[in-house]
Image (cartoon, rainbow, N blue to C red):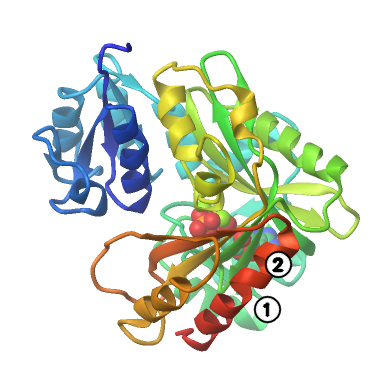
Amino acid sequence: MWNSPKVGILGGGQLGRMLVESANRLNIQANILDVDNSPAKQISSHDGHVTGSFKEPEAVRKLAETCDVITAEIEHVDTYALEEVASKVRVEPSWQAIRTIQNKFNQKEHLRKYGIPMADHRELVNNTPEELAQIGEELGYPMMLKSKTMAYDGRGNFRVNSKEDISEALEALKDRPLYSEKWAYFKMELAVMVIKTKDDVLSYPTVETVQEDSICKLVYAPARNVSDAINQQAQALARKAVSAFEGKGAFGVEMFLLEDDSLMLCELASRIHNSGHWTIEGCALSQFDSHIRAILDLPIPPKSLELLQPSIMLNIIGGATPDSHLTATQAALSIPNASIHLYSKGAAKPGRKMGHVTVTGATMHEAETFIQPLIDVVDTMRA
Ligand code: ATP
Ligand code: MG
Ligand code: MG
């Protein structure tokens, strides 16, 4: 056996919780750093957890003392604390990778050196209306003003349609470090989960993601109406982008498929990712299984990352009322082939990811038919 390694995880939200599910099945102890009773801790009873935040150096040091390898379910962690403990414990992926990736502008500057195609963008230095107006002249409208850091679920993005929007955009994202991106006229958004191991860079099939209000709503695996050539090109681009970073584990790569069928990177994440949840039912090894194996140098047969059956993942997101997500869950109970994952995060807030449902089918058409009534329910509950 593998000498019962202990894995430390920065963050105990839903991603940490699903990592724990994978670790548990291999009798691997996962020590979570987060508040007591966080979703990951609720399903893991042992005395190795640490109470605190992944932003507190002291708490990260404490976690490092309890485990053989540290990983993170989120990129917004204290990478200086990780750098410090890296001399005592393995950190996967590397703190350098997480530090570069957690700043979306730095991430793009880094990836540019590797020839990864992405939307043209400009850094804001002073965050003044004059500066953004000048950038608008260069990039054209609309453009997407983005926070470099602490961005998730589109909270950190502001679409600037014309010069008239500039003051509102700067007000919405004030006090944040900013850059602006040329608008990407995509016909579809694609994503690929990449697994970096000690000597390989593997990828799952290309999926189609559908965002609503900048939050991922649906994931179709495989991407619908996408040729095998594009599916392969997207995987190759994702692997190339992830190869630009040091360290092992899962990386989520988001891309735009443009009108002319060319691909552009949207962003990547140094962690397991919402666009990979379908792998729990859709593949022999889920992204969570693969992440645990990758960081512990355990074998990952590439065949186990192939699609077993078409899968559709629907996020259960906090809606108009505090119990909207329970209404959606109730409806999901009657959907054929639906696997329900609730995260036990407590109170729902509009836009908060409370769970997800994956529906599989013998064909994509069958899965679409099964899930449609649930999509209809979710659509009536939007905040
Ligand atoms: P995540 O939750 O995926 O981390 P995020 O807050 O980091 O999201 P992005 O992934 O940068 O934000 O953008 C969110 C969504 O906004 C994208 O999935 C896409 O739909 C849209 N978007 C982002 N950048 C552009 C762009 N340059 N042109 C057009 N649409 C864009
Ligand atoms: Mg992001
Ligand atoms: Mg994104």
Q: Position of residue 359 (x, y in %)?
A: 57, 61
The relative height of residue 151 versus residue 55 in the rendered view (above or below) is below
Q: Quadrant of residue 354?
A: bottom left
- The residue depicted at 22 percent of the width and 47 percent of the height is 43
Q: Position of residue 113 (x, y in %)?
A: 69, 30
| Residue where numbered disc 1 is placed | 163
Q: Earlier in the sequence, mark 1 or mark 2?
A: 2
The relative height of residue 276 versus residue 175 in the rendered view (above or below) is above
Classed neighbour count for the residue bearing mark 1: other residues with Cα under 10 Å, few (<14), some (14–19), many (≥20)? some
Classed neighbour count for the residue bearing mark 2: other residues with Cα under 10 Å, few (<14), some (14–19), many (≥20)? many
Please indicate whether residue 216 sits to the left or right of residue 177 in the image.
Answer: right
Which amino acid, by three-letter code, is at mark 1? Answer: Lys
Tell me, yes or no, whether the two marked residues, 1 and 2, touch with CB atoms within 8 Å: yes
Residue extending farthest right = 260
Q: What number is the disc on residue 136?
A: 2
Residue extending farthest left = 47
Q: Position of residue 262 (x, y in %)?
A: 85, 48
Please indicate whether residue 100 sits to the left or right of residue 368 in the image.
Answer: left
Q: Position of residue 307 (x, y in %)?
A: 66, 41
- The residue depicted at 53 percent of the width and 37 percent of the height is 251
Q: Quadrant of residue 46?
A: top left
Q: What number is the disc on residue 30?
A: none
Residues 246 and 137: in front is 246
Q: How many circles with numbers are drawn on the protein? A: 2
Q: Is mark 1 within 8 Å of ligand 1?
A: no
Q: Secondary structure at mark 1?
A: helix
Which amino acid, by three-letter code, is at mark 2? Answer: Gly
Q: CA distance from mark 1 to mark 2?
A: 7 Å
Query: Is residue 94 at all visible to an observer of this figure?
Result: no
